[in-house]
Image (cartoon, rainbow, N blue to C red):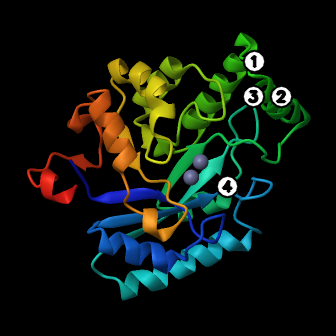
Amino acid sequence: MRVTADYHTHTVYSHGRGSIEENVKAALKRGLKAVGISDHGPGHLFIGVRGGGALRRMREEIRTLRRKYLQIDILFGVEANIVDLDGKIDVPEKMLPTLDYLLLGYHKLVRPRSVRAFFWLAANLFCGWLKLRPAWLRRLNTAAICAAVRRYPVAAVTHPGLQVDIDTAELAAVCGERGTLLEINSSYGEKLDGYVRTALPLGVSFLCSSDAHTPERVGDFAAAFALIRRLKVPVERVVNLQADDREKQEE
Ligand SMILES: [Zn+2]
Ligand SMILES: [Zn+2]
């Protein structure tokens, strides 16, 4: 198997360790044809991109790097947070057209957009700590994520079911309708088996990514490949994956 693009990488603009340029260089070293920079949206209390100007600065930096590194596509994305029950995200509306693509992920500890959202996020935090999975909360979570997928042009939902209890089948159905991908995230490996197993028979397509927080991990798909083999996910269901005869040498 071979992946030619990694669309989920973080930099110092959120809580990654490398600069955008270091991620680009790492992607080139791995032989990727495209790399996406997708830092956490500004609504995260601790790890989001800081200040409204950060996204604009990132876009400018990426424009400059595109002129320097012509041999690779450098894309500007965001891993947006869901901040309300109606699916609203934390990326300013006017920034959306300036992005090359939008990722969507549920993360704890984001700034809620309403009082109801505050109680919803708090309920997820407490139920997570107490290892409770009430059906009413699962319904709210699923409805919020599905609403976001319907509301925005979401390219892929990152690490579905991580940090939040959802009805994967319902999310996969909505993503299938909207052409939104579900991510096979190489930073979480076996934790994501359950969701892939549920989503697989439902016809939705997948995106493989590293979720690298250091340049060294850009293009590292080892755990995703292991999951794909373990669950026998057909190569053609993963949009950035190709069958490759050179597999043996590459590993
Ligand atoms: Zn994430
Ligand atoms: Zn991420």
Check the image and report above or below for 100 versus 168: below
Q: Residue at x 74, y 68 (%)?
A: 52
Q: CA separation, marks 4 and 1?
A: 35 Å
Which residue is located at x 27 percent, y 59 percent? 4
User: Which numbered mark, 4 or 1, is in the foreground of this view?
Assistant: 1
Alpha carbon separation for disc pair 1 and 2: 8 Å
Picture mark count: 4
Q: Position of residue 132 (x, y in %)?
A: 75, 18
Distance from disc 3 to disc 1, alpha carbons, whole Å, reads 6 Å
SS for dot 2: helix
- Mark closer to the chain start, 3 or 4: 4
In the rendering, at what x and y percent does residue 120 appear? 81, 29
* Residue type indicated by callout 3: Gly
- Could you give the CA–CA distance between mark 3 and mark 4, rounded to whole angstroms? 31 Å
Q: Which residue is mark 4?
A: 93
Residue placed under numbered mark 3 in the picture: 128
Residue 184 x/y as whole percent: 42, 40
